[in-house]
Every structure is written in structure tokens, then in C-alpha cells.
């Protein structure tokens, strides 16, 4: 199946979820994250939810990270070169939606990719080898390529892995884990 067909399929599946299901599943994913061996790390990169895309509500994950006194890193997108600039979340961080409805920090204390220990990766679909399909611009593959070799890459999804094959290329960086409401997949 093509990546574009899978993007359509999983956007439609997410669209069918009710607000109550989104909350329940998002909380279950956050609770399952507590079972991962990642909590001794310091810098955690988190994406903020695009509500209009019915993404996982990362507010639950954010609350866990803050409760564990972790340094949380948020990104700002540059659509000219499809890169991300990363900022430390502080009490003074101003979050504003960009033209694609992505909540982002306006500015702040920049953190370089090679400092980040754990990345929570947005996705639409993934397979049993940990390959993921995002929105198609390559932001996260470029970002993950800049990270240190042992960065922990964690996808979060409402759904189990896709069982049909899809193409990958040499720029695709596979996940280490994908966490769903029901279980953790390790790759």
C-alpha cells in the first residue's frame, strides 16, 4: 500500500474517534509510557497536539514529564527548509499556533538536537519493524538524523502496527518503541 493511501486511511480512522475516546486513549498511552526504561534521562522532546488532526493529546505526557521534573523540549517548524528549532519549555514560554495549526514556542532558550535523550514522535501509521509514516514533509527524519546515536525514539499511536507493506527509504529513521493504549511495541 502506498504511503499516501495509508495516510488517508489513518486520518480517516482518527477522524472516527470521539472526543471521549481521544481522551481515554491518550491517557492510556501516557500511562503505558511509565513502563518504559527511559525515566533516568534528562531531555525529553515532545510534540504538541494538533487538535484539528485528532492527534494524541500530549498534555498527559507533558504532565508526567513535569511531574518527574524533566527538561521538556518543544520545536518550532521552519517550512522553508523543513527543519525544526528546539526550545526548552519554561514558565515564560509562549505557545502560538502556526498557519498549519501546530502549537509551537514563539522563541526561548534553544537546545541543540544532540542534547536530547528521548523523542516522542508523531505519526499516522507504523509497521512491525518500527518504520513510521508521518505527514510527509520529513521534519522528524531530518531532526532524528541530527540527534545522538542512542536517542530513544518513541512513537505514540491510537492503533496497532500496519500489517501491509509500505515503502521506506534510506532517510527514514525507525522507532525504538511505539506505545498504544493497549500495549508497547519494541523494535
Image: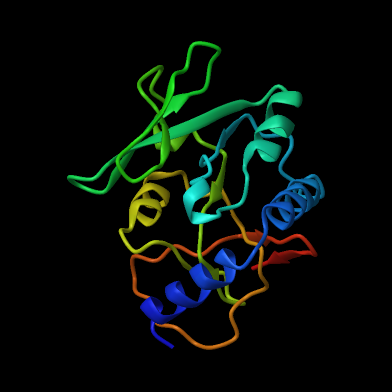
Work out whether 177 lies above or below 57.
below
Q: Return the x and y of residue 59 as percentages of the image width and height.
A: 65, 36
**Would residue 150 appear left or right of 99 to someone viewing this image?**
right
Q: Return the x and y of residue 38 as percentages of the image width and height.
A: 71, 43
Q: Quadrant of the N terminus?
A: bottom left
Q: Quadrant of residue 160?
A: bottom right
Work out whether 49 lies above or below 160.
above
Residue at figure coordinates x 33%, y 37% from the top left: 98
Residue lying at the far top of the rendered structure: 92
Q: Quadrant of residue 15?
A: bottom right
- Which residue is more in the foreground, 169 or 164? 164
Residue at figure coordinates x 52%, y 47% from the top left: 51
Q: Is residue 108 visible?
A: yes
Q: Return the x and y of residue 153 as percentages of the image width and height.
A: 56, 53
Report the colour scheme.
rainbow
Residue lying at the far left of the rendered structure: 80
Q: Quadrant of the C terminus?
A: bottom right
**Would residue 75 appear left or right of 180 to someone viewing this image?**
left
**Would residue 37 appear left or right of 128 to someone viewing this image?**
right
Residue at figure coordinates x 48%, y 55% from the top left: 53
Residue at figure coordinates x 48%, y 50% from the top left: 52
Q: How many marks?
A: 0
Work out whether 70 lies above or below 165.
above
Q: Is residue 131 visible?
A: no
Q: Quadrant of residue 166?
A: bottom left
- Which residue is more in the foreground, 18 or 28? 18
Amino acid at each position: 500500500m502506498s504511503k499516501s493511501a495509508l495516510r488517508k486511511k489513518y486520518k480517516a480512522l482518527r477522524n472516527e474517534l470521539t472526543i471521549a475516546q481521544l481522551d481515554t486513549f491518550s491517557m492510556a498511552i501516557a500511562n503505558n509510557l511509565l513502563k518504559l526504561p527511559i525515566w533516568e534521562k534528562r531531555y525529553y522532546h515532545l510534540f504538541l497536539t494538533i487538535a484539528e488532526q485528532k492527534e494524541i493529546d500530549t498534555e498527559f505526557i507533558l504532565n508526567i514529564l513535569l511531574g518527574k521534573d524533566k527538561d521538556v523540549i518543544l520545536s518550532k517548524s521552519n517550512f522553508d527548509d523543513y527543519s525544526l528549532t528546539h526550545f526548552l519549555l519554561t514558565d515564560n514560554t509562549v505557545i502560538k499556533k502556526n498557519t498549519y495549526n501546530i502549537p509551537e514556542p514563539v522563541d526561548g532558550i534553544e537546545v541543540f538536537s544532540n542534547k536530547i535523550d528521548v523523542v516522542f514522535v508523531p505519526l499516522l501509521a507504523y509497521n512491525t519493524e518500527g518504520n513510521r509514516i508521518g505527514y510527509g514533509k520529513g521534519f522528524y527524519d531530518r531532526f532524528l538524523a541530527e540527534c545522538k546515536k542512542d536517542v530513544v525514539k518513541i512513537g505514540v499511536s491510537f492503533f496497532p502496527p500496519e500489517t501491509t507493506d509500505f515503502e521506506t527509504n534510506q532517510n527514514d529513521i525507525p522507532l525504538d518503541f511505539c506505545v498504544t493504549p493497549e500495549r508497547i511495541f519494541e523494535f
